[in-house]
Structure formats: C-alpha cells, structure tokens
C-alpha cells in the first residue's frame, strides 16, 4: 500500500508534470494506486495524492467498465449545466461537502501504454474525473466552495488535526 498525502502536504498544491515514459515502473505504480484506493474505499486517486507530481489518476466507481486510468488527461468539453454532489477526498479524510460541477464531460487521455483515447462521461464517473483532474492542477474540492464554506471546512480540519494529535500523544 502507498501512503496517502493529506491537506497541508506541499505536493497536493503543485501543478503536476506530464507523464512521458510509459514503462513498467509506471504500470507498477498504477497497480499500487488502484490497490491503495480500493483499500481506502475511494473511487478515485491522483498521483500527487501518493506523492508523485505527475499528470495521471485512477478511477474505480465499482461499476462495470469504470475501472480506468487516465494519463495526461485533458477535459475538452463540459456540459453547460452545473449540478451539486457531495464530495469527499482521501487527502481530506472525514470532510464532505456538496460541490457544483458540470454533469457531463469529454476527456482526452492516454492509457497505460501511451495510446490516446476519448471518453464521454456522465454521473459519478464524470464527477470523479473532474475531481481527480483538479488534483493534477494542485486543486482540492474545498477550493471549489465559496469563502464562507471554505473557512468552515478549514476550521473543521484544524479541529480534527488537534484531536488526532491528542490521540497520538496519549499513545
Ligand atoms: Ni481527492
């Protein structure tokens, strides 16, 4: 299992670099990311979340045909609507909030062999793709909230961190 970096870790805030080599090391890392994500009960995981500042992410919505890896993805089209959906993030554990995003996207990406593909997604898959894509730009879902809600989430996070520290001290 890989370590998952959390809010406050610098790597989550850096724009990632393109993937240029589709070698066996990349394949192994991708497999490990799938395992780590499933183990943590997540539906998506981006490379910076495991400390790798590269443009790729994995998705498994537990629906048939929705176990996918996207390398150098570009969101080339989004629907005009904007819909709410409660998001969470393995890098911001314990916090959840409705986020507004387009309901459908078209994404261009490369697969594990570097071969290009285009995918149209809606529903949960479209949601996860947009959330994970944000990670590659150094953005987290809480950045998508308005100032007031963002402050609330940050306060919740700080409180959580303090509690965790206390727990650790007791041990
Ligand atoms: Ni996330």
Image (cartoon, rainbow, N blue to C red):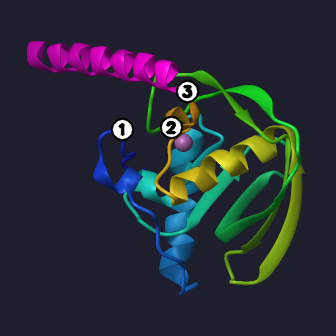
Image location of residue 22, percent across then percent down: 58, 84
Give the spatial CA distance, label 2 vs label 3.
Answer: 8 Å
Q: Which residue is mark 1?
A: 7
Which stretch did the figure color magenta? 146-171
Give the total of numbered labels: 3
- What SS does tag 3 mark? loop
Determine the residue positioned at 80% across, 46% down.
126
* Residue occupied by mark 3: 146
Whole-angstrom CA distance, mark 2 to mark 1, is 12 Å
Question: In the rendered structure, which disc, 1 or 3, sits on the residue that comes first in sequence?
Answer: 1
| Upstream in sequence: badge 2 or badge 1 | 1
Answer with the quarter of the image where residue 116 lies. bottom right
Name the mark nearer the viewer: 2 or 3. Answer: 3
At 38% across and 15% down in the image, what residue appears?
156
Q: Residue at x 30, y 46 (%)?
A: 9
| Secondary element at image label 2 | helix
> Which quarter of the rendered image does ligand 1 occupy?
top right
Select label 1 or label 3 by which is in front: 3
Q: CA distance from mark 1 to mark 3?
A: 18 Å
Look at mark 2 in the image and give the residue it sits on. 143
Residue drawn at (49%, 37%), measured in percent from left and top? 90
Using the rendered image of the protein, determine whether residue 130 is visible from the camera's viewpoint: yes
- CB of residue at label 3: within 8 Å of ligand 1? no
Q: Position of residue 23 (x, y in %)?
A: 54, 85
The secondary structure making up most of the magenta span is: helix
Q: Dividing the image into 4 quarters, which one contains the C terminus?
A: top left
């Amino acid at each position: 299992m890989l370590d998952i970096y959390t809010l406050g870790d610098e790597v989550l805030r850096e724009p990632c670099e393109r993937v240029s080599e589709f070698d066996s090391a990349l394949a192994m890392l991708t497999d490990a990311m799938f395992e780590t994500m499933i183990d943590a009960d997540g539906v998506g995981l981006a490379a910076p979340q495991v400390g790798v500042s590269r443009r790729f992410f994995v998705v498994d919505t537990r629906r048939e045909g929705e176990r996918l890896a996207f390398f150098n993805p570009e969101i080339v089209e989004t629907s005009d609507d904007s819909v709410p959906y409660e998001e969470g993030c393995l890098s911001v554990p314990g916090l959840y909030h409705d986020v507004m995003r387009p309901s459908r996207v078209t994404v261009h990406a490369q697969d594990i062999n570097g071969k290009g593909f285009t995918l149209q997604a809606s529903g949960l898959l479209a949601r996860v793709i947009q959330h994970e894509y944000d990670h590659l730009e150094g953005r987290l879902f809480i950045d998508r909230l308005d100032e007031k809600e963002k402050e609330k989430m940050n306060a919740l996070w700080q409180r959580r961190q303090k509690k965790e520290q206390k727990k650790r001290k007791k041990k």
